[in-house]
Amino acid sequence: MKDIVLKKLEERKVKVEDIAVLVYELQKSYIPDIHIDDCIETVEDVLEKREVQNAILTGIALDVLAENNQLEEPLLDIIKRDESLFGIDEILALSITNVYGSIGLTNFGYLDKIKPGILGKLNEDKQIKCNTFLDDLIAGVAAAACAKLAHSKT
């Protein structure tokens, strides 16, 4: 199933390396000897988790359904606009951050607010594609990878 998830992410222009860059940027101050390869490996580990795979597949499916106008109103409009009070996209992503404990929550909040790297690109790409769920899911994977690294280095 991981291969399916990776394929779906690539179709949405997201690579493991893009997520690893987020992890590296968040962790380099806390883990001075960290290398991008450590981050790639950790993101790969997070993507091995079945609950992570399920969340990603669900979120991408909802984004695609919205792009194709295959959801009923008012849900279609809410998802297409990424309505700030919707919150279901964040809730789905939080299921990923919790895989490695509550430390992932702070990283997720930071990434969701600042939207660095691939998250900013996905956010800007909303004119072409619906990434309401995807940007939060990617932030969730990065946050979980940060938490996994933090636990392994303390």
Image (cartoon, rainbow, N blue to C red):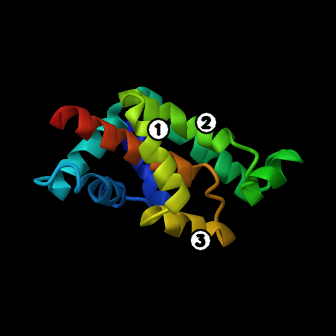
Front residue of this view, candidates 39 and 127: 39
Q: Image point 69% across, 42% down: which residue?
A: 87
Q: Which residue is mark 3?
A: 124
Mark 1 to mark 2: distance in Å?
Answer: 11 Å
Amino acid type of the residue tagged 1 in the rendering: Leu
Residue that lies at the very extreme toward the right in this rendered image: 73
Q: Nearer the viewer, mark 3 or mark 1?
A: 1
Amino acid type of the residue tagged 3 in the rendering: Glu
Residue 116 sits in which quadrant? bottom left
Within-10-Å neighbours for mark 3: few <14, some 14–19, many 20+: few
Q: Position of residue 18 (x, y in %)?
A: 35, 61
**The N terminus, quarter of image:** top left
Q: Image point 59% across, 70% down: which residue?
A: 125
* Mark 3 vs 1, N-terminal side: 1
Q: Is residue 152 left or right of residue 147?
A: left
85 above or below 154?
A: below
Q: Position of residue 44 (x, y in %)?
A: 28, 43
Amino acid type of the residue tagged 2 in the rendering: Ile
Residue that lies at the very extreme toward the left in this rendered image: 33
Secondary element type, mark 3? helix
* Mark 2 vs 3, N-terminal side: 2
Q: Image point 86% across, 45% down: which residue?
A: 72
Q: Which residue is mark 1?
A: 105
Q: Is residue 153 left or right of residue 109?
A: left
Q: Which residue is mark 2?
A: 91
Q: Image point 49% across, 61% down: which residue?
A: 119
Q: Nearer the viewer, mark 1 or mark 2?
A: 1
